[in-house]
Image (cartoon, rainbow, N blue to C red):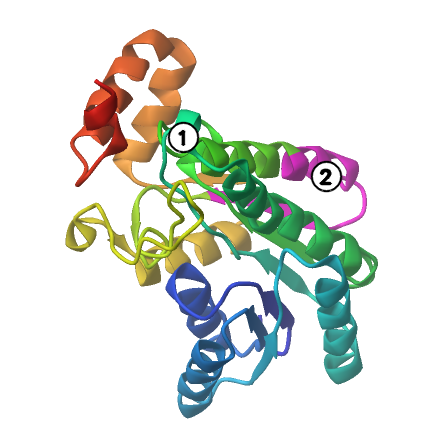
Amino acid sequence: MKNQVVIITGASSGIGRSLAFALGALGAHILITGRNKEKLEETAVALDEAGISCFPYVCDSSSESQTRDMIAATIEKFGKIDLLINNAGISMRSMFETVDLNVLKQVMDINFWGTVYATHAALPYLKKSRGGIIGISSIAGYRGLPVRTGYSASKFAMNGFLEALRTELLETGVHVLIACPGFTASNIRAASLNSEGKITGETMREEEKMMSSDEVAARILQAYLAKKKTLVLTFQGKLTVFLNKWMNGFLDRLVYNTLKKEKDSPLKEAS
């Protein structure tokens, strides 16, 4: 990865931030994006202090124009793109019956359309460099999760898009990896949206028992360098994918009962 140019969307925190450190440690030049300028600059300072070449760029992934400007700025500064990591994402937590549908649209705009915008703008340059694309998806892209209908839909869409694109690019030299972490210790739950589109500000799960974002980043980088097509992380994640394929009726009840135990779960009120 030495001297390769890597774009990581949504890299102010969590998996994106950890990937920036992991790739930067290998000598890559990193462009990180995020909507929050203050948090983005904090991450950029930390990367710089670690001796990592970093270029922060404020960008809302749900905006096609901002995303295209970001890709153009990357080319202007570095002259090429070797790897695009579509990591920007947001979650939601609400029963579908009571959710403001604008919440689902917002989640889809960031998680799915953000991936589409960045990939479409970067693809000509990735083909020139015979580079790669990584989509940070989720187990929710294989198995729909209750009270996360919009999040699950966005990740299913992301998986399908990247799988189709991977097949289109078979003879171009561009590698596509779909990475699906299980529950990871990050701020995505605290930043998730409620039924009204407001940020919850707290997690509903025991973060300390989850795989760390640094470990997830290391596994993703290992899978990319090994040219894997898909990566499903954690035993729980692998089991969920397997059971959903062969015993989805059983898994309906198992997933329902598991997520009903979450703190302040909307499923408790629905039962």
Task: Determine whether the residue tagged by mark 2 lies in a helix, strand or loop.
Answer: helix
Residue 45 lies left or right of residue 154; in this view the side is left
Give residue 2's quadrant in the image.
Answer: bottom right
Q: Against 218, is 5 above or below? A: below
In the image, which residues are magenta?
161-179
Side (left or right) of 218 relative to 270: right
Above or below, 111 relative to 71:
above
Q: Can residue 143 be seen in this view?
A: no
Q: Measure the alpha-carbon separation of dots 1 and 2.
A: 35 Å
Q: Residue at x 43, y 77 (%)?
A: 39
| Magenta segment includes 171 | yes
Kindly identify which residue carries mark 2.
165
Q: Which amino acid lies under the numbered mark 2 shown in the image of this protein?
A: Leu
Q: Nearer the viewer, mark 1 or mark 2?
A: 1
Residue for badge 1 = 98
Q: Which quadrant would residue 154 be assigned to in this image? A: top right
